Image (cartoon, rainbow, N blue to C red):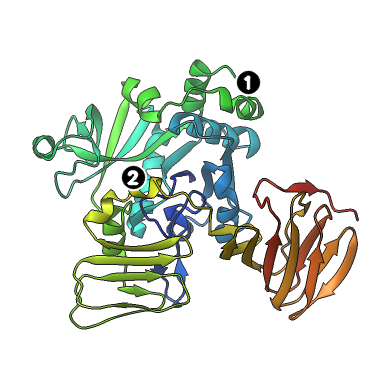
Amino acid sequence: MNIVLLSGGSGKRLWPLSNDIRSKQFIKIFKTEDGAYESMVQRVYRQIKTVDADATVTIATGKTQVSAIHNQLGEEVGISVEPCRRDTFPAIALATAYLVDIQGVDPEESVVVCPVDPYVDDDYFKALKELSGQADKGEANLVLMGMEPTYPSEKYGYIIPESEERTAAVKTFKEKPTAAVAEEYIRQGALWNGGVFAYKMKYVLKKAHELIDFTDYDDLFSKYESLRPISFDYAVVEKEENIQVMRFAGEWKDLGTWNTLTEAMEENVVGKGTMNGECSGVHIINEMDVPVLAMGLHDVVISASPEGILVSDKVQSSYIKPFVDELDQQIMFAEKSWGSFKVIDVESESLTIKVTLHTGHSMNYHSHKNRDEVWVVISGTGKTIVDGMTQSIKAGDVITMSAGCRHTVVAESELKLIEVQLGKEISVQDKQKFELEY
């Protein structure tokens, strides 16, 4: 099975655990059998490989998420990187061209496209295999998965099939309605449109060539910033007459808000948190190394991270985005391909960061024009390279780098260090990368 996972999102609705780099799918909040925690993307990837160990998984995403994907899934997963955001049709066209031109997949093969962050059981991925098999038959140009609605939701578009068969031709699509209108759609046998569909790759490539002047993947990538943003639904689905829908009645949740996310959590407290016996319906998600205490609260979510603290009624938490939009704060935590960093102190002319590097990984070899840096090793072993000079390091060692000197650090075991940046113009843009000199 070929599967493309669409990974976007700005991370505003699950603030403070998410930000512009760390979208909701990377938050480690679901407990695994061994007692550790995994994120939505890790959970979905594990479920896919459980159902189909040979599945080719490609994640279509923006540049800012690549490091987090490699951090959580490793280097083997395929990634189709969008140079900039251009909505779902260009993203899907680029991912399809990536599979055919870069990965060498036969354009006659089918691919399933779905969001990266549904909360589902393994039967969902078994249904995706069926969806792919239905697309292989060539009876329709597109095969959608329609979710059996459990209530008249205003959040989803609706698919009305021509019959009650498990796989049927699509009669019509309806946009997100009011609750009253949704009830009428459901009476007509409508299904939720969950943004899950399958097609033969040659079909979408043909549609892409009709709408975009390009030759192959590399050419499409180079022209990507000039493309008109347009959704796949508008560019393809609404104009295609030969469409089928396959019903899915299993568990399927869109965990897009704190309210829906806490419904899927197996435990009420993640991290350091305590509540008294007078609390009910309270969830605490704490990424800080300080305790959180809740008393006498009902239907409340409390979330703490380096980005900030949220205390909200669960229903009201759905309306968080405009308030987060008003916050002007630098990124305080991020996962990178080599490890992670957490900002622990901000002053006018200094920035203090805790850096964790995974075994065998390193930072880019780079320099800064406007700041000096000091590294204090707090655990692990490794080596630094400063202006071409290599030095072994261990806990307690201090390394200083003046502005302009080239430097990197390599972790021989998991390496933790405190990085202090000193200067009047500290900026993430103040970084020049170089090739290592050996």
Residue pictured at 31% horizontal, 59% vertical? 261
**Viewed as shown, does residue 302 lie left or right of 365?**
left
Q: Is residue 129 visible?
A: no
The residue under label 1 is: 215
Judge by depth and name the residue closer to the eye, 101 or 311: 311
Labels 2, 1: front one = 2
Q: Position of residue 207 (x, y in %)?
A: 47, 21
Residue pictured at 26% horizontal, 63% vertical? 263
Q: Earlier in the sequence, mark 2 or mark 1?
A: 1
Residue pictured at 14% horizontal, 36% vertical? 178
Quadrant assignment, res 337: bottom right
Residue pictured at 54% horizontal, 45% vertical? 58
Q: Position of residue 31 (x, y in %)?
A: 40, 71
Query: Are the residues flagged by discs 2 and 1 in contact, CB closer than 8 Å?
Result: no
Judge by depth and name the residue closer to the eye, 424 or 192: 424
* Mark 1 residue element: loop
| Crowd around label 1: few <14 · some 14–19 · many ≥20 (10 Å) | few
Number of marks drawn: 2
**Viewed as shown, does residue 190 lie left or right of 128?**
left
Amino acid type of disc 1? Thr
* Mark 2 residue element: helix
Q: Which mark is residue 85?
A: none
**Viewed as shown, does residue 368 lie left or right of 6?**
right
Amino acid type of disc 2? Pro
Q: Position of residue 249 (x, y in %)?
A: 23, 50
Quadrant assignment, res 343: bottom right
**Which quarter of the figure is the C terminus placed in?**
bottom right
Above or below, 381 relative to 103? below
The residue under label 2 is: 322
